[in-house]
Amino acid sequence: MLQALKIDRNRDEAFDRITALVRDIFNVEIAAISLIEGETQRFRSIQGLDLTEIPLEASFCRATWREGATVVLQDTLEDEEFRDHALVRETGLRFYAGVVLRTAEGMPIGTICAMDSKPRAFSEREMRVLENLALIASNEFQLREFAHHDALTGALTRRHFMHETARLCEIAARKKLQVTVIMLDVDHFKSVNDQFGHASGDEVLRSLAAACKANLREFDIVGRMGGEEFAIALEGAPEDSARTAERLRRAISRLQFTFDEAPMRVTASFGVASLRKSERDVTAALARADKALYKAKADGRDRVVVSNG
C-alpha cells in the first residue's frame, strides 16, 4: 500500500509529457527523468520500465552523473563497464543515452535518459535534441522549486501544501488509506527574534524544517503555513501519526544553537488530527489539529496533543 502511494505521489504530468516526447522522438522503449540525491536515483517520470528508485551504483545513469556530460552507449554488450549489468542480463537493454540535468547555476540535480533493447547509433543532432529536452526538464524543476517551496525552509508553500494534500486525499480514498495531519509551532519563537535578531530566527526555522524532513518518509508532505507554524500531512492512523509527532518533537528539542556566543535550544508544540470518512480535503482536519496545538501550548508547550474530534 505504501509503495503504491509513493508511486502515485511521484507521478507528474509535466515530466510524463517530456519522457513521452523522448520515446516518440528517438523511437525508444524506455525514457526516464530522475533526481539524484546522495547515492539514490529517484524517478520523477519513467515510461517503459517499472521503477520508483534505485541505488545510483546500480543505474546506467551513474556514468552520466560521473562524467557530468552526455553519455551514449550504442551497444551495452560492447561496453566493459555495463555488459554484465543486471538490466542488460535481465531485460536485454542494449542502448543508453543520458544527459545531466542542472540548475541555472550549473549544479547537477539529476538525469534524463533514453534506453532501448536494440543497439543503435545516436547522431549529433539527436544528442542536441536530448540535451534541449534536458534543459526543459531542468527548467521545470527550477520553476517548481521557486513556485512551490518556501525560500527560507524548503518546505512547501501554504498554497502548494493544500494542492499536494488534495492529491494525497484523493489517492488515499481510492486505496482506502487514512490521512492524518500534524500542526506544529515553535515555542516562544518571538523571543528568539527579539533577543538574537531575525537572522537567528531564520536559522532556527531552517534547522527545524531540516529536522522534520530527516524524520519523515519521502512521500510525507511538509508545508510552512506562516511564520513559525508548519503542517504535515501523512498516510497513517492517528496513533501512528502521534508517534511520528513525538519523534519530531524530540528531534527539535535536540537541536543546538549558539547565538551571540550563548547556547540555546528550542522546543515545539504539536497538534494531531485525522480526516473523517466524509472529508475530502484536509481543511477541517487542520482546524482540529490547530485546536489541539493550542491545547498543547496551554498545557505547558513542548508536547503532542491528539484531537478527540
Image (spheres, rainbow, N blue to C red):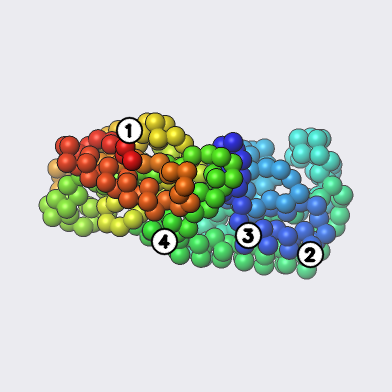
Three-letter code for the amino acid on which mark 4 is drawn: Arg
As measured in the structure, the alpha-carbon distance from the residue carrying label 2 to the one carrying label 3 is 18 Å
- The residue to which callout 2 is attached is 25
As measured in the structure, the alpha-carbon distance from the residue carrying label 4 to the one carrying label 1 is 26 Å
As measured in the structure, the alpha-carbon distance from the residue carrying label 2 to the one carrying label 4 is 36 Å
Locate residue 2 relative to residue 278 in the image: left or right. right
Identified at 79% across, 62% down, the residue is 24
Where is residue 176 drawn, in percent x and y? 56, 40
Residue 264's place in the image compared with 69, above or below, is above
Identified at 13% across, 55% down, the residue is 194
Locate residue 248 relative to residue 186 in the image: left or right. right
Q: Residue furthest left?
A: 195
Three-letter code for the amino acid on which mark 3 is drawn: Glu
Q: Which mark is residue 13?
A: 3
Identified at 62% across, 66% down, the residue is 136
As measured in the structure, the alpha-carbon distance from the residue carrying label 4 to the one carrying label 3 is 19 Å
Q: Are marks 1 and 2 in contact (CB under 8 Å)?
A: no
Specify which label sits upstream in the sequence, 3 or 1: 3
Specify which label sits upstream in the sequence, 2 or 3: 3
As measured in the structure, the alpha-carbon distance from the residue carrying label 1 to the one carrying label 2 is 50 Å
Residue 68 visible here: no
Quadrant position of residue 159: bottom left
Specify which label sits upstream in the sequence, 2 or 4: 2
Q: What SS does tag 3 mark?
A: helix
Where is residue 21 drawn, in percent x and y? 73, 63
Q: Which mark is residue 54?
A: none
Three-letter code for the amino acid on which mark 1 is drawn: Glu
- Number of the front mark, 1 or 2: 1
Q: What SS does tag 2 mark?
A: helix
Specify which label sits upstream in the sequence, 4 or 1: 4
- Give neighbour class at mark 2: few <14, some 14-19, many 20+ (Cα, 10 Å): few
